[in-house]
């Protein structure tokens, strides 16, 4: 059943009104609610709204919000782009993003790992970027390999689609290996804890030949790639080497920028134009933003899972600023904090570290066993008040980060 | 007489889903805090399993890696030899299951285990057991309440022997038995991760003290002890809160978190 445009517009109006009401009631931005209501009254909204729109989807465990912002910037050099820049990445959020911009002829959408199949089916995207797959909130979401299998199944019904895949991650290679239209990118693989066993047959993977992998039992192995990221240089067999630049910190953001550059090239955008667009992408939904709080500058970082935390800790290794770490364990964070022991916090050993958040004692215990001297405080404000220097680094997991953002906006409103 | 406590961390690349390598790190750290030398030997899949370690730490994993781990361990034989000479074992979740007679995976309902413990694990008909777990440990251990977080589908039935303790909050081995894990002179097994020894330093010290020739003095680190006891108090209170709420909602012995 197709929805009449009139009914769809009415649905969008109702949804937006509910979103605005939710926003006024202080229940967040209202975008997620508006999206849910929209899909409720107009279940085929996604396919209707995406008619005539060139869509690109981005999915991953880590980096999807940032990469989506970079891809939007790149495609905005050629298209009028709609995007879910607030990170509302389930079906409702996608519909809302498409509905919010009538003039858009292109959509760049971040998609939750579990919703990728639905999004591919209803949006018929032109391209999809798959970055990495690791554990995230294990007590809520299913196991990594079953996500990879579902991706593989979803891709098997959409053969026209161009898949831009980081095959340095064995889980991604497993998901895309049978697709006929894959642009393979090797970003390197700093996190192999979730992919030490072959996704095809469970035998151990052999990583001994450097950055590639090979199953010790079956045929599964890392394929050769069209693009290889080497430090900040994106190398390609046929094309000249491109130097990737992003103002965002950390090696993982260079990887994200490389993926957005490859998307640009595949969509016919000159690398120079893509790079210029990417270099203008700064803070995203508050992440990497420097705010003013308690008389100090505070750099805001978020990490949501062990791979994300390890990358962030590595990034801070040679930094001298005081670090505030906040850990919560709400449903959105995962209620199980055992992942703290999958992260090596010892690179922070020489710094002033402060622990806070609802699960500060879990964190504090972890830091003790990693030999990281620290102090524990009830609130982030107390940490910042006790810190030294002009600028402090704050790293929180999802709800800890969101609650600090609320604190910042309350402080700036006063 | 052990001059250095050798701790073998078995297949963290296959069995390390719930931060289980933390248990090995914590054993070593708590030995060193008492000026007892300790060494963690990491045995990745494909490595030979040393058979002369004092303590073996085996963690939890997904179905496929669990199957791979049991195949490798059986072929290698190091774990069986170490068990035979009564080395200490700490086995969590899938690690507990593979030491038993048989367990279930998504491919098979009757995968043979290493047959070192009198336990058989079947796939549960009820929903997965996920949430805070609180266990009243066997009184002979003289350790405080065991706090942890469980996440498993398997239902493990003890054919003989003692469990680690009675389940006060959560599920443990099976929905019916209200007990968790297994306990013997050389084994501490549990469904509680957290990791287990981070939440329960008494268990860590108990396992260390069971190693022949080890004398544990008082823990030097005041700060660590304070953080651990604050965490324990907070987690035990949380588990009891969840249990009260479940009783009110008529969800006795079922997890809601
Ligand atoms: Zn294989």
Image (tube, coloured by chain):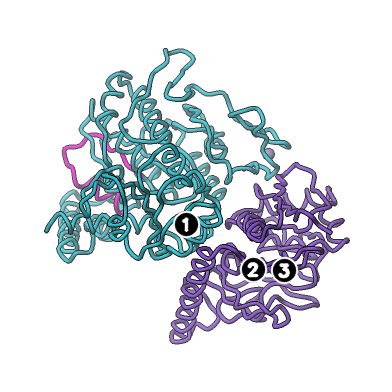
Chain colours: A cyan, B purple
Q: Which residue is mark 3?
A: B188
Q: Which residue is mark 1?
A: A137
Q: Residue at x 54, y 52 (%)?
A: A370
Q: Quadrant of the C terminus of chain A?
A: bottom left
Q: Is residue A99 magenta?
A: yes
Q: For the residue carrying disc 3, how many other residues have a C-alpha within 10 Å: few (<14), some (14-19), or many (20+)?
A: many
| Chain of residue at mark 3 | B
Instruction: Say which label, 2 or 3, has the lower sequence index.
Output: 3
Q: Which residue is mark 2?
A: B218
Asked if badges 3 and 1 are on one and the same chain, I answer: no
B146 or A134: nearer the viewer: B146
Chain part drawn in magenta:
A92-110
Asked if badges 2 and 3 are on one and the same chain, I answer: yes
Q: Quadrant of ligand 1?
A: top right
Q: CA distance from mark 3 to mark 1?
A: 27 Å
The answer to whether one can see residue B128 in this image is: no
Q: Is B98 on the left or on the right of B152, as rendered?
A: right
Asked if badges 2 and 1 are on one and the same chain, I answer: no
């Amino acid at each position: 059943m197709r929805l009449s445009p009139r009914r769809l517009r009415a649905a969008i109006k109702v949804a937006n009104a509910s979103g605005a009401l939710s926003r006024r009631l202080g229940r967040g931005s209202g975008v997620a609610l508006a999206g849910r209501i929209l899909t409720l009254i107009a279940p085929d909204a996604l396919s209707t709204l995406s008619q005539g729109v060139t869509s690109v989807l981005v999915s991953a465990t880590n980096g999807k919000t940032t990469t989506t912002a970079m891809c939007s910037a790149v495609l905005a050099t050629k298209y009028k782009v709609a995007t879910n820049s607030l990170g509302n990445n389930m079906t409702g959020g996608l519909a809302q993003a498409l509905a919010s911009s009538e003039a858009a002829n292109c959509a760049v959408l971040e998609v939750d790992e579990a919703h990728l199949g639905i999004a591919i089916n209803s949006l018929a995207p032109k391209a999809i970027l798959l970055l990495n797959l690791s554990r995230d909130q294990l007590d809520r979401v299913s196991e990594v390999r079953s996500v990879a299998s579902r991706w593989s199944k979803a891709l098997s019904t959409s053969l026209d689609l161009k898949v831009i895949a980081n095959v340095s991650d064995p889980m991604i290679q497993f998901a895309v290996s049978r697709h006929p239209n894959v642009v393979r990118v090797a970003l390197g693989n700093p996190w192999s804890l979730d992919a030490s066993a072959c996704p095809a047959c469970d035998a151990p993977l052999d990583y001994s030949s450097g950055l590639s992998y090979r199953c010790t039992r079956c045929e599964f192995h890392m394929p050769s790639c069209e693009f290889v990221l080497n430090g900040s240089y994106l190398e390609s067999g046929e094309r000249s080497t491109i130097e990737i630049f992003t103002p965002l910190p950390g090696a993982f953001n260079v990887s994200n920028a490389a993926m957005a550059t490859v998307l640009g090239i595949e969509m016919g955008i000159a690398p120079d134009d893509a790079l210029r667009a990417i270099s203008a992408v700064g803070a995203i939904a508050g992440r990497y933003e420097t705010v003013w709080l308690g008389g100090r500058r505070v750099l805001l970082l978020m990490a949501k899972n062990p791979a994300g935390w390890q990358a962030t800790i590595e990034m801070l290794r040679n930094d001298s600023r005081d670090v505030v770490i906040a850990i919560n364990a709400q449903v959105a964070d995962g209620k199980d904090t055992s992942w703290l022991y999958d992260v090596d916090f010892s690179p922070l050993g020489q710094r002033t570290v402060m622990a806070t958040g609802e699960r500060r004692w879990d964190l504090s215990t972890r830091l003790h066993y990693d030999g990281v001297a620290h102090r524990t405080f009830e609130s982030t404000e107390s940490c910042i008040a006790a810190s030294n220097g002009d600028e402090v680094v704050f790293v929180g997991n999802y709800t800890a980060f969101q609650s600090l953002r609320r604190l910042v906006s309350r402080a700036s409103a006063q | 007489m052990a001059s250095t406590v050798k701790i073998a961390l078995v297949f963290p690349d296959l069995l390390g889903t719930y931060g289980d390598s933390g248990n090995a790190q914590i054993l070593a750290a708590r030995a060193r805090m008492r000026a007892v030398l300790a060494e963690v030997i990491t045995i990745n899949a494909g490595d030979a399993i040393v058979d002369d370690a004092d303590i073996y730490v085996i963690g939890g994993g997904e179905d496929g890696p669990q199957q791979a781990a049991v195949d490798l361990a059986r072929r290698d034989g190091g774990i069986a030899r170490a068990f035979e000479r009564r080395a200490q074992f700490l086995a969590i979740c899938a690690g507990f299951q593979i030491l038993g007679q048989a367990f279930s995976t998504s491919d098979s309902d009757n995968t043979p285990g290493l047959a070192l413990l009198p336990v058989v694990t079947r796939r549960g008909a009820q929903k997965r057991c996920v949430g805070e777990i609180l266990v009243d440990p066997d009184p002979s251990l003289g350790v405080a309440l065991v706090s942890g977080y469980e996440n498993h589908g398997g239902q493990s039935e003890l054919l003989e022997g003692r469990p680690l303790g009675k389940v006060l909050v959560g599920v443990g081995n099976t929905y019916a038995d209200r007990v968790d894990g297994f306990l013997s002179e050389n084994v501490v097994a549990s469904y509680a991760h957290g990791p287990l020894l981070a939440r329960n330093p008494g268990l860590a010290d108990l396992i260390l003290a069971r190693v022949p020739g080890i004398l544990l003095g008082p823990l030097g680190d005041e700060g660590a002890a304070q953080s651990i006891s604050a965490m324990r108090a907070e987690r035990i209170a949380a588990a009891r809160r969840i249990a009260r709420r479940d009783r009110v909602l008529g969800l006795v012995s079922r997890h809601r978190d």
